[in-house]
Image (spheres, rainbow, N blue to C red):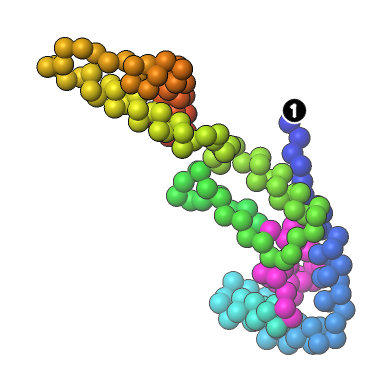
């Protein structure tokens, strides 16, 4: 049975921030105005209500991830806060991308949580830096040039890579050409 890591590093910090906000008399006065303007039986899905809640959040300098929780407090008197200060959004167009929204400066534990969540997304591409890639590409070009020269049907003598670049480099040139072909197949599906 696989267990999943639930990031809770920001939960208490955000809940404390929300409690501090709710105890603010100015905020409380604004909430009462909104509640009076939009009573409990009023449809809270309207653009006007959403705009007022969002505007209140911006005036109080709250990150955008608090908007929903401020709405919950105004509409239902529920005190909750975001569990994270970031959001990972998989791309709709391709499974190889994900957008990360960060709402506040992350603490070290929050950053570790973010890293764990991003690394758990299996569809994201992952590759390491390549050693001596320029040299390997040059070797591949040499191999291709020798192969091209040998394809000439009028040529009587077929030249090897060893004759073209020297016996000591030939083995490495063959290896590099083969490795790059395999690497491209793995990364690009060719």
- What residue is rendered at 69% in x and 58% in y? 86
Answer above or below: position of 30 versus 149.
Answer: below
Number of numbered tags placed on the structure image:
1
Q: Could you say where residue 85 lies in the image, as x and y percent from the top left?
A: 73, 61
Query: Does any portion of residue 55 appear in the rendered image?
Result: yes
Residue closest to the eye, 101 or 111: 111
- What residue is rendered at 81% in x and 64% in y? 14
Residue closest to the eye, 26 or 141: 141
Answer above or below: position of 168 versus 130.
Answer: above
The quadrant the C terminus occupies is: top left
Residue closest to the eye, 93 or 176: 176
Q: Give SS at disc 1.
A: loop
Q: Within 10 angstroms of label 1, few (less than 14), some, or many (20 or more) residues?
A: few
Residue 34 lies left or right of residue 164; in this view the side is: right
Q: Which quadrant of the figure has residue 100?
A: bottom right
- For residue 106: magenta? no
Q: Could you say where residue 121 lies in the image, as x and y percent from the top left?
A: 62, 41
Q: Which residues are magenta?
A: 60-86
- For residue 76: magenta? yes
Answer above or below: position of 105 versus 35.
Answer: above
Q: Which quadrant of the figure has residue 145?
A: top left
Residue closest to the eye, 109 or 58: 109
């Amino acid at each position: 049975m696989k267990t999943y890591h639930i990031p809770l590093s920001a939960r208490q910090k955000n809940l404390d921030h929300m409690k501090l906000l709710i105890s603010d008399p100015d905020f409380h006065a604004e909430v009462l105005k909104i509640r009076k303007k939009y009573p409990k039986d009023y449809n809270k899905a309207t653009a006007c209500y959403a705009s007022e809640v969002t505007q209140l959040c911006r005036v109080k300098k709250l990150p955008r991830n608090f908007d929903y929780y401020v709405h919950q407090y105004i509409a239902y008197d529920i005190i909750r806060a975001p569990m994270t200060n970031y959001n990972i959004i998989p791309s709709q167009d391709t499974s190889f991308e994900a957008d990360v929204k960060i709402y506040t400066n992350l603490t070290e534990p929050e950053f570790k949580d973010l890293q764990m969540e991003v690394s758990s997304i299996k569809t994201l591409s992952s590759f390491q830096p390549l050693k001596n890639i320029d040299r390997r590409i040059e070797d591949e070009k040499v191999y291709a040039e020798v192969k091209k020269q040998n394809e000439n049907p009028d040529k009587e003598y077929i030249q090897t890579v060893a004759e073209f670049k020297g016996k000591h480099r030939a083995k490495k040139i063959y290896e590099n050409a083969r490795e790059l072909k395999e690497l491209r197949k793995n990364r690009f599906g060719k």
